[in-house]
Amino acid sequence: MSDSPYHDDRGNKDRSITREPGSTLDKVDRRSGNSTAKHGDPFLIGDAMTGGYGKGPDILHSCTIAAEKGEIAVIVGPNGAGKSTAMKAVFGMLNVNDGAVRLDGEDITHLSPQQRVVKGMGFVPQTSNIFTSMTVEENLEMGAFIRRDDFRDTMAQVYDLFPILKEKRNQAAGELSGGQRQQVAVGRALMTKPKVLMLDEPTAGVSPIVMDELFDRIIEVARTGIPILMVEQNARQALEIADKAYVLVQGRNAHTGTGKQLLADPEVRRSFLGG
């Protein structure tokens, strides 16, 4: 493996906003324990999920999404395809009437979102994902609500990943730019020391430059071994950094492959990437 911070040439190569291997985030402590994963089972998998909200109709139909350790898995597709619904199903926010969700081999299908956070899931919703009246540092402290240990090292690692947050740590989070707010939201999720990080539209509403920087930071998190499962509307850019990618259409898997494979697929390019 080269000493480049990028896997397979993923991401923005502007070295001024990235770090070399050996940065503090590379030393993030992740929960340990005996794995119960079956041989060949992905670290995180929503397996053949069928379900929807409450007593309403099914939105997902035998939908499968998965992510391995250190992998960026991206869910893309047209509006209304069920992308965010699939993410929420994995996080326990809607009913999975058939299929299963497993984390590190453990069936967590019937656990609440709160219980899944304790199991090691970090989830960043698209909107309303920060406490606007609290300072940046107070938001990060809120992310450590399940911790009983000293979380100062983790906060230092978050500040290393997002230096602007350290600079603005005493400022109300609601006063930050959209991209900085997203950094707060991701940082707060990392304060739980998650086994897996799930991001719903992390670059929604930000400029292309900020999007590239956020993607660079996401790559860095994945390099520490944390799987990333991400729903993203900027499909082409997301596929460029994806180890694995899923195209959903009407709640079903339409195409699956590596990001490069889907970028090169004529049908995917024509139908979802504008040719």
Image: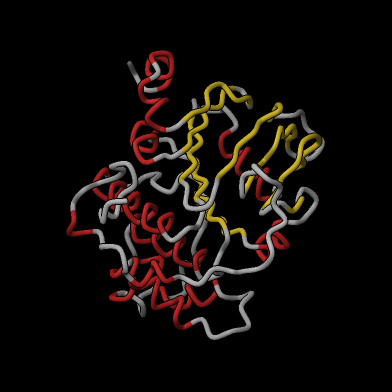
Point 44% across, 66% down: residue = 187
Relative placement, left or right, of 114 versus 145 is right
| Above or below 15: residue 71 | above
- Most distant residue in the bottom direction: 150
Point 29% across, 70% down: residue = 163
Q: Position of residue 105 (x, y in %)?
A: 71, 51
Q: Position of residue 102 (x, y in %)?
A: 71, 48
Q: Position of residue 264 (x, y in %)?
A: 36, 21
| Above or below 157: residue 93 | above
Point 66% across, 68% down: residue = 33
Label count reads 0
Q: Position of residue 56 (x, y in %)?
A: 78, 32
Q: Quadrant of the C terminus?
A: top left
Q: Quadrant of residue 119?
A: bottom right
Relative placement, left or right, of 97 versus 221 is right
Coloring scheme used? secondary structure
Relative placement, left or right, of 17 versus 156 is left
Depth check, front residue: 13 or 88: 13
Depth check, front residue: 270 or 44: 44
Depth check, front residue: 203 or 269: 269
Point 43% across, 77% down: residue = 155
